[in-house]
Image: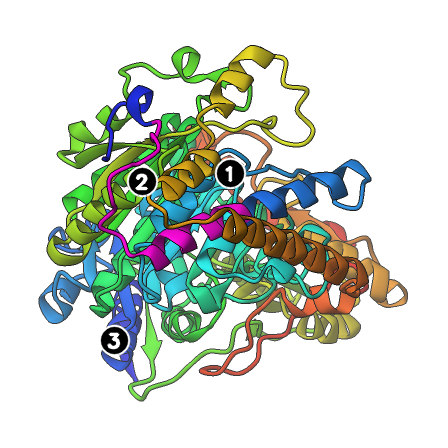
Amino acid sequence: MVADDPAVAVAEPKAPASSLSPEIQIDLYRQMVRIRRFEEKSAQAFMRAAIKGFCHLYIGQEAVAVGALSVLEARDAVITAYRDHGVALARGTPARACMAELFGKQTGCSHGMGGSMHLFDRAHHFYGGHAIVGSHTAVAAGLAFAQQYENTGGVTLCLLGEGAVNQGVFSETLNLVSLWKLPIVFLIENNDYAMGTSVSRSSAGLPLVNRGSAFDMAGRTANGMDIEDVRAKVAEAINLARTEHLPTLLEVNTYRYRGHSMSDPDTYRTKEEIEEHKKSDPILLYRRKLEGRQVLSDALAKQIDADARAEAQDALTFAEQSPEPDLDFAFSLRFSAEDQIDPIPRPRYSDI
Amino acid sequence: MAKITYRQALNQAMAEEMERDPSVFLIGEEVAEYQGAFKVSQGLLQRFGAKRVVDTPISEAAFSGLAVGAALYGLRPIVEFMNWSFSFVAFDQLINNVGSLRFMSGGQFDLPMVFRGPSGGGTQIGATHSHCPESWFAGVPALTVVSPAFPEDAKGLLKSSIRSNNPVFFFEGERLYGLEGEVPDADFLTPIGEAKVCREGDDLTIVSGGYSTHVALSAAEALSANGKEADLIDLRTIKPYDFDRVARSVRKTNRLLIVEENKPFAGWGAQIAYDVQHRLFDWLDAPILRVTGLDLPQPYNGKLEAQVLPNVERILAAARQLLA
């Protein structure tokens, strides 16, 4: 049922029944569709220049965030890189707050100060949205350190792109988490391309999961187009982190159909390659699987899709109609209020 | 009052704050079992245990980033750099993460953390170990930069920095650690952003900070022997610096000399000179002068290094020019 080799991951009709409840299966499917429709709406808004800056879409990778985050508890911490829309949505950040952030609006989850690459949602223990490649892996270790220090029982899930594995800080961080037995799972979303540079042109010692072995870390791989495989492997790793405080490095193979960002002309791979990967689309595969199990009817699938489209449209309308933040608000964010010492004077210098 | 060293003052500050708040912990290279490369953390491991006094591998980027994550989660890390010059391998963490995460998250997170360690030259350890990066970090909007010159201020400011809900970059000095001074016995805090007048005079104002304050003090005494009295202001906090205290003095003396160990281009003294000329132009009887480190990488050679650092001779020459 759970295949290690992506080549045999295609679900056939009459798939064996899952150990997951029908409700969970439907929810996994629904979350992926929500992200897909949200991202399509984001792409449209970007094309008409309503969303500015960079915009990295999650289309094709939905099974990774949804499958991985589906096994987490509320007290766990999640942190990721800049391809973060799907992760935020899967974590529970409302679509309205995500879309409004893409629009730079006051109502955005980062109040318009972060944008597409820097979504944050403290209420959901979502620690961002980080755009310096590899940098957040060390921050992730700190979340796990604090969970251990405070003995919360929580664990940290850190997603990173495969391009991040060649940053020095990532190796330093693997050493620390293994040395100190921190409750953390590093999940490499390997979509084959670090911007336009393929894994084979950037990384020695494949597969990438090998990077953990120098530090005696548990390593696992998963098929990122098969959401139940992702879920099962992440569950195993999270359990190891939670019960034994052992970190794991997971390599999840996936694929993005769109360019690195919306600004990417995508000249480094062929149309045929992209079309070939679309045959193993995670949403399509899971729909077939659930239909085979008779968990998902055509009518329910259509309803889920209609709901997701409506949610994305609602988020778009909300974002369009939301107010812009102003400069005084931006200045108010520079410093935290003091409560243990006297206030510190905070001149702006520019208007002295 | 007890007479203790600058090193002991820092040690007491950390111990008192760790005693007071279990979310405070110290992390860095050799801070625990070795008792600190400069013995600033002496005894803390024995007192607070390995959970709160954490030795790291030589991985500044990783342990600085780890401290950021811990702070986002609500802990209050004190990160020791064995030397501020080593912080540059963690520059991304310090600028992009410490400097931006609160703001980029729309104010959802606090970063109550202190980065501290010795900076500056004067001990003949070469260019890569002698940087004085206060001004580089002061250029980052979210960062607070503190540089005490005396044991009392080292203690009071470190305690305030640990209690601050904002990231504080705290600059000590290898040449300051052994310096002795009176420190109150009772619990006290020194306010961040307030300068201290070390010496009063009507003829010129000297503004300085960190180790340079001691050099400026020697120069001011030499001036006094020649009948000229300087108001010497020790900034204590570099950013935000105490403009009002500087302005009060300049309105009295009408002459300003700034002494800083930074290299001349865009050192913090340049900001002060800009602000003073802009706001107090009519109060000035002479152009503002700065005595800085010379625009060279720090030489190993001792005689050359003494020339590169701000020194009494150059301060006196500048003062004579101002008073002429």
**How far is mark 3 from mark 1, CA to CA?**
32 Å
Q: Chain of mark 1?
A: A
In this rendering, the label closer to the viewer, 1 or 2: 2
If the image is split into quadrants, where does the N terminus of chain A sit? top left
Chain identity of mark 3: B
Using the numbered discs, state the Cα–Cα distance from disc 1 to disc 2 in whole angstroms.
26 Å
Residue A184 shows up from this direction: yes
- Residue located beneath label 3 in the image: B22
Q: Is residue A27 magenta?
A: yes
| A329 or B223, nearer to the observer | A329
Quarter the C terminus of chain A occupies: bottom right
Residue A244 falls inside the magenta stretch: no
Q: Amino acid at mark 3?
A: Pro
Q: Residue at x 29, y 57 (%)?
A: A21
| Amino acid bearing label 1 | Ile
Q: What residue span does the magenta drawing correspond to?
A: A10-33
Viewer-closest of A14 and A343:
A14
Residue A132 numbered tag:
1
User: What residue would you read off at disc 2?
Assistant: A230
Disc 1 secondary structure class: loop
Using the rendered image of the protein, determine whether residue B98 is visible from the camera's viewpoint.
Answer: no
> Compared with residue B155, is residue A239 higher up or lower down, i.e. above or below?
above
Depth check: B151 or B131 in front?
Answer: B131
Q: Looking at the image, is mark 1 or mark 2 earlier in the sequence?
A: 1
Relative horizontal placement of residue A226, taking residue A257 as reference (left or right):
left
Report whether mark 3 lies on the same chain as mark 2.
no
Q: Amino acid at mark 2?
A: Val
Q: Position of residue A69 (x, y in %)?
A: 37, 52
